[in-house]
Amino acid sequence: MKKEDFRLSANSATYEKSSPQTIRALFASIAKDYDQANDFASLGRHRVWNQKLIDSISPAQHLLDLCAGTGEIALGFLKTHPQSCATLVDFCPEMLHVAQHKGQKFAQRMRTICADAMELPFPKQTFDAVTLAYGIRNVAQPQTCLQEVFRVLQPQGTFSILELTRPSFAPLGWMHKLYTYTCLPLFGRYISNNASAYRYLAKSVQKFVAPQELCEMLSQCGFERIRTQSFLFGTATLITCKKPYLSQPSC
């Protein structure tokens, strides 16, 4: 899919999160430039956040990386865990194609699957760790996704979510909103010639639930030991939790 296949008019630069086909087309349109755009947009800080997420994963033989995108999290995990393997799941094949190209030296220890995060094609208790970076806000029904994670995660397995969030301090929140709505589209126009896609991504950050509400969803699904860590005044948040040894999901 070419970049020009996805465009939004200046007056309609938003769409409903419940339209997976549109979101898939969005990510397909920016897949080749996604890593470079992230470097510009976060001034490289996202690499520090990504490493914090990777460090939060308890020793795991098999990692499931949901909304894996271009594979930054899974590939970082495989580099630091030479005895482990990883399954990358994303609903955008163009993103997974980039991940496959980047991870050629890990081909024996990784696999990519194009699938919906709300309907995972795996048996119960398949993985002993799950990660989800910068993707939960784009899932149509986040709680359904969390239920699926609970189902495929082994008892005592860890689940780590990294997401872009809004600072709670009002002045910082205003500056963050100004930055996301003005600078992100500019970066998108400069790097991928697609300001519209980054206009949507900016809105997705501003409109998604606060970390506290996401923690409540995790608790309702049966997860325990839920912890949060904020970065750069709350512009990104890492949430970690575990599946109890004996439990049933409550959501």
Image: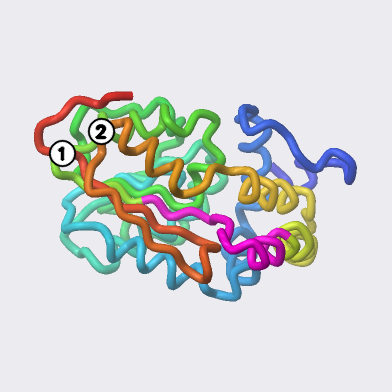
Magenta residues span: 161-177
Q: Label 2: which residue?
A: 222
Q: Which residue is depicted at the point 71% across and 46% down? A: 200
Type of the residue with mark 2:
Gly
Q: Quadrant of the N terminus?
A: top right
Q: Is residue 192 visible?
A: no
Q: Local crowd at mark 1 within 10 Å, few (<14), some, or many (≥20)?
A: some
Per the image, label 1 sits on a secondary structure element best described as loop
Q: Local crowd at mark 2 within 10 Å, few (<14), some, or many (≥20)?
A: some
Count the numbered circles shown: 2
Label at residue 244: 1
- Whether tag 2 and tag 1 are in contact, CB under 8 A, the answer is yes
Where does residue 61 sit, x and y in percent of width and height? 16, 51
Q: Nearer the viewer, residue 107 or 34?
A: 34
How far apart in space, not on screen, are marks 2 and 1 (Cα)?
8 Å
Where does residue 197 sit, x and y in percent of width and height? 73, 48
Which quarter of the picture shows residue 243? top left
Where does residue 145 sit, x and y in percent of width and height? 41, 32
Where does residue 53 sit, x and y in percent of width and height? 35, 61
Q: Nearer the viewer, residue 145 or 74?
A: 145
Q: Is residue 46 visible?
A: yes
Q: Which residue is depicted at the point 89% across and 46% down? A: 10
Q: Nearer the viewer, residue 142 or 220?
A: 220
Q: Nearer the viewer, residue 173 or 195?
A: 173
Can you say whether 74 is above or below 117 in the image? below
Q: Is residue 143 left or right of residue 138?
A: left
Type of the residue with mark 1:
Pro
Per the image, label 2 sits on a secondary structure element best described as loop
Q: Which residue is depicted at the point 75% across and 62% down? A: 178
Q: Which residue is depicted at the point 67% across and 66% down? A: 171
Can you say whether 156 is above or below 54 in the image? above
Q: Is residue 147 left or right of residue 126?
A: right
